[in-house]
Amino acid sequence: MTENEVGYKIRGACFSVYNALGPGLLESAYEQALIIELRGIGLQVENQVAIDVSYKGSSIGTGFRLDLVVEGLVIIELKSVEKLCEVHHKQLLTYLRLSGIKLGYLINFNTNKLSENIIRYANKL
């Protein structure tokens, strides 16, 4: 399965979760619901994946945790905030660069228009 095929399934799963739960819950609730939805359609999902960060050839420890990694191909960074900020976008771009994963989605469930709050980023490796 390609990144784009996985991404298509992720979008569908997000709408299923949003339609069932609506906005206003904690990020952790959406994370667990999305894991259930993605696994239910046969996708392999890891959550809270720790990534070791190195600087000038030396490890500086776990620099971040990826909310979800689907099929080892796509990062999902979940939010449940009033409004996405610039730093949220930069956070996902940094995760893509440091992990070497090519495709990521920034998803904010705390909205009245989910379609405008699923943002796709492609990492140019």
Image: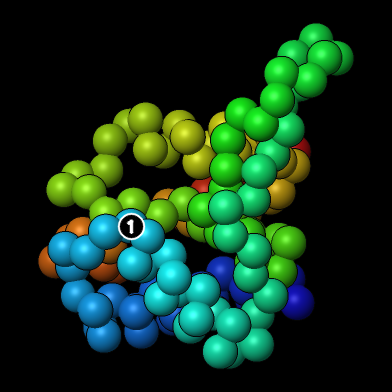
Q: Quadrant of the C terminus?
A: top right
Residue 101: x and y in percent read: 71, 48
Q: Which of the 4 quarters of the picture holds residue 43?
A: bottom right
Side of 20 relative to 112 (left or right): right
Side of 64 relative to 98 (left or right): left
Residue 85: x and y in percent read: 28, 35
Please rate how many residues cluster around mark 1, counting C-alpha atoms within 10 Å: few if below 14, some from 14 to 19, many from 20.
some
Residue 46: x and y in percent read: 64, 64
Q: Which of the 4 quarters of the picture holds residue 117?
A: bottom left
Side of 112 relative to 114 (left or right): left
Q: Which of the 4 quarters of the picture holds residue 84?
A: top left
Residue 31 in the image: above or below residue 81: below
Q: What amino acid type should be assigned to the residue bearing mark 1?
A: Glu
Between 62 and 110, which is closer to the camera in this rendering? 62
Residue 53 visible within the image: yes
Q: Quadrant of the N terminus?
A: bottom right
Between 116 and 42, which is closer to the camera in this rendering? 42
Side of 34 relative to 80 (left or right): right
Dot 1 corresponds to which residue?
27
Residue 93 in the image: above or below residue 107: above
Residue 33: x and y in percent read: 41, 76
Residue at left offset 73%, top offset 33%: 52
